[in-house]
Amino acid sequence: MLPHHPLSLSKVLAGLALLGATGCAAAGPRHVAMAPLFAESSAERPTAPAELEENYFQRDRTTALSEAELHRILEAPVFLSERARIGIVPVSDRYDVESQIPFEDVIAKLGARLSSEGQFEAVTEISTDWPAQGSVAGLRELAARYRTDYLLLYRHRFVDHDYQNAWTLFYPTIIGAFIVPAQTMESNGIMEATLFDVKTGTILFTAFERVHGSEEENVWHGDRKRRRRQRDLLEAASHDLARQVVEKVGVLMAARPDPRAAGVVNAGSSDTGRDPS
């Protein structure tokens, strides 16, 4: 016979109930306190990183400009001088002086548009027959002869692609091989106008106008048809290129420093040390 234990059944049940309640409380949801996204005091806030102003790419330093000269050029204000003269000159690849006769009338239209806007004191086309060196040195020499402060350098380039189309089905016929437009002639071109500051040798802007055209032609006189198509494309897009140039020149004119503001600054600096009364 088992000995009688002094612990009663009611006490045992009460203890089990207490353990169950404690376990449920431990398994309940826990609230984790998160740190604020920004510190409350400005002293505890992280400082913003400094702007990058130095060139750390040592392999890029192969130019004739020193680091100080490069920074001086980039920090200088960019604007169009008042009462300036501009010359428009055709250039070839590598911006050498173009020796061929400019038959296209794009340059004439650029000059007429700039003259009508009155943004320059004088606008002139520049003849490249004058003796001058090549590349940029020759361009500056031509500008000096014409006494122009700026040069608008114009050039265009084309990439042509010809291929056979579905009209080649008529090639087995004797007449069709000569008259059907079985050749698609496609031209993609780009017109470029760059404003060159003669005194500083810097470029103020470049305006691009892209053109595209294609025609179905027969096999006769392909070169003549290609030149005609390119001339038509240039003439049709010359107004858009001139509009871009005028708009960009207007932005440079608006960036001119205000002489009245400069006068106020100079006056303020000259009054330094005087009694305000």
Image: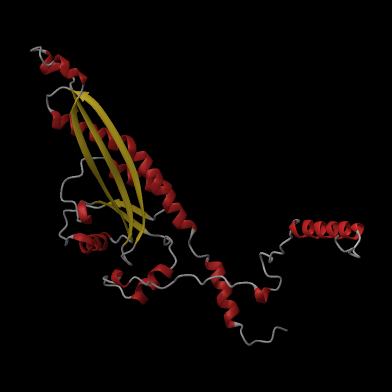
Q: Position of residue 105 (x, y in %)?
A: 26, 40
Is residue 272 found left or right of 214 in the rendered image? right
Corner quadrant of residue 4: bottom right
Decide: is 13 above or below 216. below
Decide: is 235 above or below 107. above
Which residue is depicted at the point 56% across and 67% down? 260
Decide: is 274 above or below 226. below
The mark tally for this picture is: 0
**Where's the C terminus, which quadrant?**
bottom right
Asked whether 107 or 186 is in front, the reply is: 186
Which residue is depicted at the point 14% across and 16% down? 179
**Where's the N terminus, which quadrant?**
bottom right
Q: Position of residue 56 (x, y in %)?
A: 37, 72
Decide: is 185 above or below 242. above
Which residue is depicted at the point 35% across and 54% down? 122
Corner quadrant of residue 171: top left
Q: Position of residue 22 (x, y in %)?
A: 81, 60
| Structure colour scheme | secondary structure
Q: Residue furthest left?
A: 174
Asked whether 97 or 56 is in front, the reply is: 56
Q: Residue furthest front?
A: 1
Asked whether 210 or 260 is in front, the reply is: 210
Is residue 68 found left or right of 220 in the rendered image? right
Q: Position of residue 128 (x, y in %)?
A: 19, 53
Corner quadrant of residue 199: bottom left
Is residue 48 found left or right of 90 in the rendered image? right
